[in-house]
Image (cartoon, grey):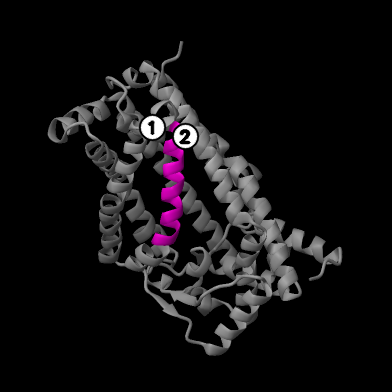
């Protein structure tokens, strides 16, 4: 019978093979369309911009290929070398085996496992993104972001994981259910805490100064049935020229956030359409559906973990002794990443369905698809989006439909005569 370690190593290898094959398919698709601007996109970019978009996608795919190989190698080394049980024994020798020690062990492992990926993050930011004109960050700011993230992992992660471990270890036979309830409660609290107290540590949020635009967007939100306390502008241009919009929080904590780069690239009508799309996610229940689905999946995960925690081979196959809670959480989290890869297409299919629904809501709210189409065209042009990805690649990796798919869906809705 295959051991848990053999299952993990086989899963890592198979995932790497699929990742490389998908990348090669997408690179071939880029090569097939190279220099051939699709007529449907001739209004949104010229031939030179289309060529640069292809070069940008090609560069990202090459980087991703080597990054996948590196990540797989690190994970194989972590599983097969015995470093995790060695570090657990060393850690408990220093700090004991209590809940606080377990929480510290998990955070230390999480931070340690993030270190091998830092060179790739640096290269992506200061070589790839900079080469194509997107990077606005400095090395000091980049290092500061990662230092703040590490400190937050300690300040927030250790006490929250301590609480989770305590609930699990005192939960009796139904510990997996109580653990799930504790984790769900933690997530809901973080949904409020992060936008108001964590994100401002990384970005500056200022009220939208343009009174006319603010009144126009708040009026749109009111018409769309979205009660927002405020509209803030985030200084996304400190790090990148990429643009976005979102809303954060729940209830009276809810606010609309616009990247300053989005304000610089879109007119009032296009901003309305982008905001209407985000409101569409709220009005169509995508936020709560996502939370519900995440809750169901995490409950299933805790149930599986409950079985694994009672299986001695789950620990001994990786070199651990006994059934300590912290190593069980760590091993499960690492294995969940390997298993979860194969479910990405399902999650992306649901996400793309939600994107179509949000697009249609925006079309209805602003009165036509024109403003949204113009906004999407402009953002795709400025972001050098890949307009012709391979279907298999987009199925596995794209949470949004391709631009051609979104436009086709909007055209069908317009032709069907669907109004407000």
Badge 1 element = loop
Kindly identify the residue that appears in the image at 40 percent across and 37 percent down: 69
- Asked if 56 appears above or below 116 in the picture, the reply is below
Q: Position of residue 136 (x, y in %)?
A: 37, 69
Q: Nearer the viewer, residue 280 or 4?
A: 280
Badge 2 element = helix
Residue bearing the label numbered 2: 177
**Magenta-colored span:** 176-193
Q: Nearer the viewer, residue 36 or 250?
A: 250
Mark number, residue 171: 1
Counting residues from the start of the chain, the first of labels 1 and 2 encountered is: 1
Q: Position of residue 207 (x, y in %)?
A: 45, 80
For the residues bearing labels 1 and 2, Cβ distance under 8 angstroms: yes
Kindly identify the residue that appears in the image at 35 percent across and 62 percent down: 198
Task: Determine which quarter of the picture holds residue 393.
Answer: top right
Image quarter where the C terminus lies is: bottom right
Kindly identify the residue that appears in the image at 49 percent across and 28 percent down: 14
Q: Position of residue 79 (x, y in %)?
A: 33, 27
């Amino acid at each position: 019978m295959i051991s848990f370690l053999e299952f993990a190593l086989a899963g890592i290898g198979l995932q790497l093979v699929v990742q490389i094959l998908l990348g090669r398919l997408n690179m071939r698709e880029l090569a097939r369309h190279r220099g051939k601007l699709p007529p449907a996109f001739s209004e949104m970019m010229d031939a030179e911009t289309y060529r640069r978009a292809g070069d940008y996608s090609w560069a990202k795919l090459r980087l991703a290929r080597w990054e996948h190989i590196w990540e797989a190698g690190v994970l194989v080394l972590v599983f097969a070398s015995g470093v995790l049980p060695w570090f657990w024994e060393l850690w408990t020798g220093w700090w004991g085996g209590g809940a606080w020690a377990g929480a510290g062990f998990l955070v230390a492992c999480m931070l340690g496992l993030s270190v091998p990926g830092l060179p790739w993050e640096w290269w992506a930011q200061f070589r790839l993104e900079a080469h194509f004109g997107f990077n606005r960050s400095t090395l000091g700011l980049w290092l500061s972001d990662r230092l703040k993230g590490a400190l937050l992992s300690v300040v927030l992660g250790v006490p929250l994981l301590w609480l989770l471990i305590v609930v699990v270890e005192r939960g009796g036979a139904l510990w997996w259910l109580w653990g799930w309830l504790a984790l769900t409660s933690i997530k809901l609290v973080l949904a409020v805490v992060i936008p108001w107290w964590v994100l401002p540590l990384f970005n500056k949020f200022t009220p939208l100064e343009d009174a006319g635009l603010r009144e126009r967007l708040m009026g749109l939100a009111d018409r769309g049935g979205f009660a927002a306390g405020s509209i803030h502008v985030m200084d996304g241009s400190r790090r990148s020229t990429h643009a976005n919009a979102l809303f954060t929080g729940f209830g009276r904590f809810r606010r609309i956030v616009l990247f300053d780069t989005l304000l610089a690239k879109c007119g009032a009508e296009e901003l309305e359409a982008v905001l209407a799309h985000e409101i569409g996610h709220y009005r169509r229940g995508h936020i709560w559906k996502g939370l519900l689905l995440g809750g169901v999946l995490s409950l299933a995960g805790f149930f599986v973990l409950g079985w694994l925690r009672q299986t001695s081979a789950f620990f001994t196959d990786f070199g651990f002794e006994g059934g300590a809670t912290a190593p069980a959480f760590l091993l499960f989290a690492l294995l969940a990443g390997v298993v979860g890869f194969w479910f990405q297409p399902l999650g992306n299919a649901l996400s793309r369905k939600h994107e179509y629904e949000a697009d249609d809501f925006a079309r209805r709210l602003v009165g036509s698809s024109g403003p949204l189409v113009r906004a999407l065209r402009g953002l795709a042009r400025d972001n050098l989006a890949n307009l012709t990805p391979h279907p298999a690649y987009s199925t596995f990796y794209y949470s949004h439909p391709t631009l051609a798919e979104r436009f086709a869906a909007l055209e069908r809705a317009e032709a069907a005569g669907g109004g407000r």
